[in-house]
Image: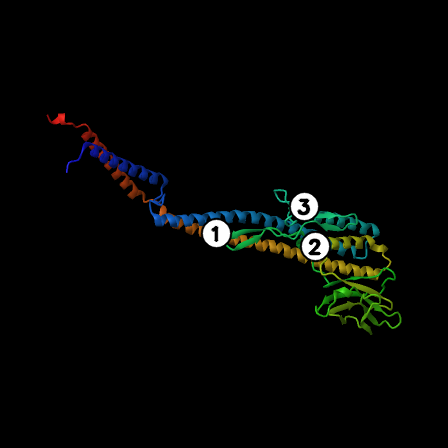
């Protein structure tokens, strides 16, 4: 078969282009250090590598989220630690104020210190992160959560939103604790109710509510509260009435009272301490949570009453109530700090898992895509020689004509 000159040139050019492309492709692999750069190199390996790269991208996103979540929870842990210190100082001040040797001036000085501590706690509740977002406002991060009113009470303007970041597949970690959960929803130290003791006429016996809890929700009717406890002026028998209108109903009929006994009615159990005097009375109102700020305001009010209190027995009852509620607040803050610590531990564990997986994936990628340099260089040199040979052959043949044979 005769090969025309045009066919020869075309075939030679195609061959040189192929050899040149082979050399360029091998140079690209050598410069990158990778065996698989495109699906053309190895379709199966390329697909596996694409899956590995997707996994690594997800892990990188999770690691960024872990860093952000760690920052937020670390700040909260520090804030709660500072709150613990403030509450402990309040408790120490209360113990000092009750030692019986304080003058009115001393007690007022303690009250002033407490008021400063209250301001500090409000500032902690209004803490902001590095972006200026309020930490305890829930989703309302631009809204200052706590504000003190003229009467000293503290209002909450945030919401109950909890932000979460995904730190692994199917795992999300909260990045905030809301202001109400952190500072408002403190367990009532005596249970589900608070006791209000009258100022006129005053109780002089020191009778106090030790505990008051709803024990049977089916029997309890919130609409008929609050309940009034009265001790008969003559017999000193105890009677409990509800707030039914127009005439309160007797829910615990007159009966002799024994100190420490539990009074049961309408699904409620109430335990009293002390020995009431004839004519004493008090009211219980349902209230399961008492905010830290309310407790601190009560502590300040107690210290300001000081030695001028006309009813030292009731003053001591109020002292015990405040001290118990301070202990409840401290336990609550401990648990909030512990929650932040648990989250930080979970984040640390997840970070370690990601690093392990990342290392395994990197090893898997390396085994698939990394270039065998010795083999690649040998093949590259062979390809260069083949290219040079084809170029030289083409060049020599290109210079020939029929006149060379005449």
Residue 187: x and y in percent read 70, 60
Neighbours of disc 2 within 10 Å: few (<14), some (14-19), many (20+): many
Which residue is most to the left? 406
Residue 315: x and y in percent read 82, 59
| Direction from residue 28 to residue 290 in the image, left or right | right
Q: Quadrant location of the C terminus?
A: top left
User: Which numbered disc covers residue 354?
Assistant: 1
Q: Is residue 120 above or below residue 228?
A: above
Q: Residue at x 74, y 67 (%)?
A: 221
Q: Is residue 243 above or below residue 346?
A: below
| Direction from residue 244 to residue 188 in the image, left or right | left
Q: Nearer the viewer, mark 1 or mark 3?
A: 3
Q: State how far apart marks 3 and 2 are (Cα).
A: 17 Å
Neighbours of disc 3 within 10 Å: few (<14), some (14-19), many (20+): some
| Direction from residue 137 to residue 241 in the image, left or right | right
Q: Give the mark, 2 or 1, whose residue is nearer the N terminus.
A: 2
Q: Give the mark, 1 or 3, whose residue is nearer the N terminus.
A: 3
**Can residue 19 be seen by looking at this rendering?**
yes
Q: Secondary structure at mark 1?
A: helix
Residue 189: x and y in percent read 72, 61
User: Which numbered disc covers residue 36?
Assistant: none
Q: Quadrant location of the N terminus?
A: top left
The residue singled out by tag 2 in the image is: 184
Q: Quadrant of residue 205?
A: bottom right
**Can residue 92 be seen by looking at this rendering?**
no
Q: Quadrant of residue 272?
A: bottom right
User: Which numbered disc covers residue 143?
Assistant: 3
């Amino acid at each position: 078969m005769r090969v025309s000159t045009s066919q020869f040139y075309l075939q030679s050019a195609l061959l040189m282009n192929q050899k040149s492309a082979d050399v360029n492709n091998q140079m690209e692999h050598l410069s990158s250090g990778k065996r698989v750069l495109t699906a053309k190199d190895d379709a199966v390996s390329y697909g596996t590598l694409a899956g590995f790269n997707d996994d690594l991208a997800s892990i990188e996103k999770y690691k960024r989220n872990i860093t952000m979540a760690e920052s937020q929870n670390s700040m909260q842990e520090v804030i709660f630690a500072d709150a613990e210190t403030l509450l402990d100082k309040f408790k120490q001040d209360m113990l000092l104020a009750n030692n019986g040797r304080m003058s009115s001036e001393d007690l007022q000085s303690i009250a002033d210190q407490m008021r400063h501590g209250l301001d500090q706690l409000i500032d902690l509740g209004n803490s902001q992160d590095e972006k200026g977002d309020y930490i305890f406002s829930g989703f309302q991060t631009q809204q200052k959560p706590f504000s003190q009113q003229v009467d000293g009470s503290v209002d909450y303007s945030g919401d109950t939103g909890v932000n979460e970041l995904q730190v692994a597949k199917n795992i999300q970690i909260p990045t905030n604790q809301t202001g109400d959960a952190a500072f408002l929803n403190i367990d009532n130290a005596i249970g589900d109710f608070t006791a209000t003791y009258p100022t006129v006429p005053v109780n002089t016996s020191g009778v106090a509510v030790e505990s008051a809890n709803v024990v049977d929700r089916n029997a309890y009717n919130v609409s008929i509260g609050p309940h009034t406890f009265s001790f008969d002026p003559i017999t000193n028998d105890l009677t409990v009435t509800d707030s039914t209108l127009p005439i309160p109903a007797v829910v615990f009929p007159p009966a002799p009272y024994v100190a420490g006994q539990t009074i049961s009615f309408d699904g409620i159990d109430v335990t009293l301490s002390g020995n009431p005097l004839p004519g004493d009375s008090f009211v219980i109102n349902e209230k399961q949570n008492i905010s830290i700020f309310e407790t601190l305001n009560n502590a300040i009010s107690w210290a300001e009453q000081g030695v001028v209190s006309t009813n030292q027995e009731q003053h001591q009852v109020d002292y015990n109530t405040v001290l118990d509620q301070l202990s409840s607040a401290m336990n609550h803050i401990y648990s909030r700090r512990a929650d932040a610590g648990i989250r930080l531990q979970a984040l640390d564990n997840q970070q370690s898992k990601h690093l392990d997986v990342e290392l395994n994936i990197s090893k898997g990628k390396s085994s698939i895509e990394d270039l065998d340099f010795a083999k690649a260089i040998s093949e590259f040199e062979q390809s260069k020689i083949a290219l040079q040979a084809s170029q030289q052959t083409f060049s020599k043949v290109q210079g020939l004509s029929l006149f060379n044979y005449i």
